[in-house]
Amino acid sequence: MESSGGGALLRNRRLESFLDTSSGLRVEEAPKILVKEKPELWLKKDVYMDDNGWVSSIISWIRIVTCFVSMMVTTFIWALIMVVLIPWPYERIRQGNIYGHVTGRMLMWILGNPIKIEGAEYNNERAIYISNHASPIDIFLIMWLTPTGTVGIAKKEIVWYPLFGQLYVLANHLRIDRSNPTSAIESMNEVSIIYPASFSPHLYKVSISNRCDFQAARAVVRNNLSLIIFPEGTRSKNGRLLPFKKGFVHLALQTRLPIVPMVLTGTHQAWRKGSLHVRPTPLAVKYLPPISTENWKAEKIDDYVKMVHDLYAAQLPETQRPLA
């Protein structure tokens, strides 16, 4: 299944550093994607015509400002909704997911990058969704394209971001202190007990131990949630795939959810490291078939990590593959 839409937002470099995922609730809704084929734009290689002229720069800045203002408007609206829904934490999670779908899709449309989406039939099941991460644009693609019921995580400092941080907290998503593993584990246990449906386990710098794994797994299974994780644990600076952490495998072993890889291509060229110039690079999002974890064994964790990493390397263009 192939489809295309437009757009991407660039928010703020600091905001991107705190977000690792999107949010949501039940896994039954798939995003509606408008189809408008432009086959000539779907490049097989990571090559495009760059334009650093003053006209292109002005257009880029107009889009950036429009994205920022639009995001503030939707964030304010959903913050009001969340306040009204304070007595209903489960409904707040659902509204947080709807916010992500609406805002992510809108921002991608404003930026205007042509997008090719493949394998969207795999985005409507309960699973652990994983994605490579090379640009802030990835955040907004994930917000838009992961199914309802998908939850993620952010660093605890996100609460200090006007409107957006408060909305994140109101939506009952997990914040952790990655500099303090003990605190992070305790925070996760606390949230899992008080608000089981809000659990989001992206604990790459926190070794996922038996002490907290079983609570996370029970929360996910009990509330029919999906997860979204960047297995690299951080953003690639040059677009090349980084080594994968083991967190997604630990969670798969505990939940037995299938793993659905999402392969993002071209986003690192659309918004380069240290730049505020969004370029008209064609983007591609490809869902791969679910990987069953029913028969996975704990003693083969390293093998599973390598298998999934190799799968990504095979799907990415040469310029995004890891260096030998």
Image: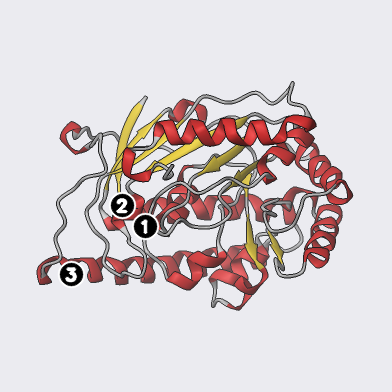
Along the viewing direction, whichever of 96 and 42 lies nearer the viewer:
42
Q: Is 208 placed left or right of 23 in the picture? A: right
Tell me the tag on residue 57: 3
Residue type indicated by callout 2 = Gly
As helix, strand or loop, the secondary structure at mark 2 comes to loop
The image quadrant of residue 314 is: top left
**Given contact means CB atoms under 8 Å apart, are the residues at marks 2 and 1 in contact?**
yes
Q: Residue at x 51, y 53 (%)?
A: 100
Tell me the tag on residue 107: 1
For the residues labelled 2 and 3, the Cα–Cα distance comes to: 16 Å
Q: Is 285 placed left or right of 98 in the picture? A: left
Along the viewing direction, whichever of 264 and 89 lies nearer the viewer:
264
Categorize mark 2 by other alpha carbons within 10 Å: few (<14), some (14-19), many (20+): many
Q: Position of residue 242 (x, y in %)?
A: 50, 49
User: Residue furthest toward the top?
Assistant: 295
For the residues labelled 1 and 3, the Cα–Cα distance comes to: 18 Å
Categorize mark 3 by other alpha carbons within 10 Å: few (<14), some (14-19), many (20+): some
**Given contact means CB atoms under 8 Å apart, are the residues at marks 2 and 3 in contact?**
no
Residue type indicated by callout 1 = Leu
The image quadrant of residue 185 is: bottom right
Task: Give the mark nearer the N terminus: 2 vs 3.
Answer: 2
